[in-house]
């Protein structure tokens, strides 16, 4: 009888603790404005996804706080990542959207500018797992990967950690591609406008989920050819049907493949959302749960479908494990990847 009573009291205490934690989270968020720091330019693919999330996730957070988006474009999300890491309140009142490159920048990028350890962020989740596309204007005469290894293709680039700057640079150095990268565009939107104007001949490194809804008409109109994709095998079904060859089908050298995987594995978390380090566990868990519920929310999914935004989410826990795997890559491999990204 005494054992039963003791167990009941312990169970009641634990249940009471869970209830108090839930009440505490709701009390914290009730009537609060939560800043959503978006490390991208408004109007680009990251901005579109983040704005959609901002319209829905507040309903899923206990206390129903108001989500206030704040766009902070700069250095491929490094400015936003540094701010979240070291200067933003660590109480759950701020979270952010970062480029995938910002997550791996401390490992394979400019570690002097990326003043953070990505493992310490509070991982909320990612909205989708990405497929990267490389495309060229029809008048550039590039139809396949083989073409871009044989002739120069002028492509638009953005911030140092942006995929449209990094990915063609890596393909140049590891596989011998002949991309001529024109840097300095504020974001993917401006780089794409440069393609339309004929200032550049194409782009390599843009997410298919960004390209398809905003610029997919270019394919139908015959302006561009998507000549390649970078995706986990077997690749995107629609791109496969368009004969956009997967980069992994042409990489035969084992060392080259390892280096490319170290860089391209970040596509597994294509739209990452993180909180500053040190957010109380119960509040981080509330944000994670709100994110997961939003990814299943019929209204959110319907709006995403209307905007042609693929939703293939990764949970915060899975995102955290993926980041840990990146930090476990051997240093010699990381060194070669860093050299390829310069």
Image: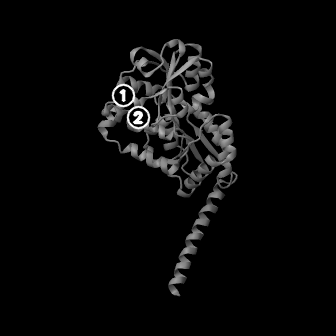
Question: Badges 2 and 1: C-beta atoms under 8 Å apart?
Answer: yes
Q: Give the percent coordinates (x, y) of residue 122.
A: 51, 49
Question: Residue at 49% of width from left, 43% of height from top?
Answer: 85
Q: Which mark is residue 233?
A: none
**Does residue 21 lie above or below 4 as drawn?**
above
Question: Residue at 58% of width from left, 31% of height from top?
Answer: 210
Q: Which mark is residue 340?
A: 1
Q: Disc 2 versus disc 1: distance between alpha carbons?
A: 9 Å
In the picture, the quarter occupied by the C terminus is top left
Q: Give the percent coordinates (x, y) of residue 257.
A: 35, 33
Chain-order first, disc 2 or disc 1: 2
Residue closer to the observer: 119 or 216: 216
Residue located beneath label 2 in the image? 263
Q: Give the percent coordinates (x, y) of residue 340.
A: 36, 28
Residue closer to the observer: 2 or 95: 2
Q: Secondary structure at mark 1?
A: helix
């Amino acid at each position: 009888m005494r054992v039963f009573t003791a167990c009941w009291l312990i169970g009641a205490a634990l249940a009471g603790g869970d209830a108090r934690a839930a009440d505490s989270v709701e009390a914290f968020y009730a009537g609060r404005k939560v800043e959503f720091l978006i490390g991208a330019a408004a109007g680009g693919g990251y901005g579109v996804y983040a704005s959609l999330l901002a319209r829905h996730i507040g309903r899923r957070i206990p206390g129903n706080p108001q989500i206030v988006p704040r766009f902070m474009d700069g250095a491929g999300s490094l400015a936003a990542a540094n701010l979240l890491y070291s200067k933003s309140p660590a109480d759950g009142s701020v979270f952010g959207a970062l480029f995938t490159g910002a997550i791996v920048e401390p490992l394979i990028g400019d570690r002097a500018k990326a003043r953070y350890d990505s493992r310490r962020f509070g991982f909320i989740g990612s909205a989708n797992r990405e497929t990267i596309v490389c495309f060229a204007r029809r008048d550039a005469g590039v139809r396949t990967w083989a073409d871009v290894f044989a002739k120069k293709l002028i492509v638009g680039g953005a911030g140092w950690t942006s995929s449209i700057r990094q990915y063609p640079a890596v393909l140049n150095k590891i596989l011998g591609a002949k991309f001529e990268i024109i840097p300095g565009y504020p974001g993917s939107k401006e780089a794409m406008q440069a393609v339309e104007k004929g200032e550049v001949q194409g782009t390599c490194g843009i997410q298919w989920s960004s390209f398809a809804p905003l610029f997919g008409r270019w394919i139908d109109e015959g302006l561009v050819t998507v000549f390649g994709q970078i995706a986990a095998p077997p690749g995107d079904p629609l791109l496969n049907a368009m004969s956009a060859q997967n980069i992994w089908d042409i990489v035969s050298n084992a060392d080259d493949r390892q280096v490319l995987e170290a860089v391209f594995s970040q596509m597994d978390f294509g739209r990452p959302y993180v909180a500053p380090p040190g957010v109380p566990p119960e509040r981080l868990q509330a944000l994670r749960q709100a994110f997961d519920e939003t990814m299943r929310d019929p209204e959110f999914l319907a709006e995403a479908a209307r905007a042609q935004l693929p939703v293939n989410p990764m949970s915060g826990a899975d995102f955290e494990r993926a980041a840990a795997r990146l930090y476990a890559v051997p240093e010699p491999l990381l060194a070669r990847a860093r050299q390829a990204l310069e």
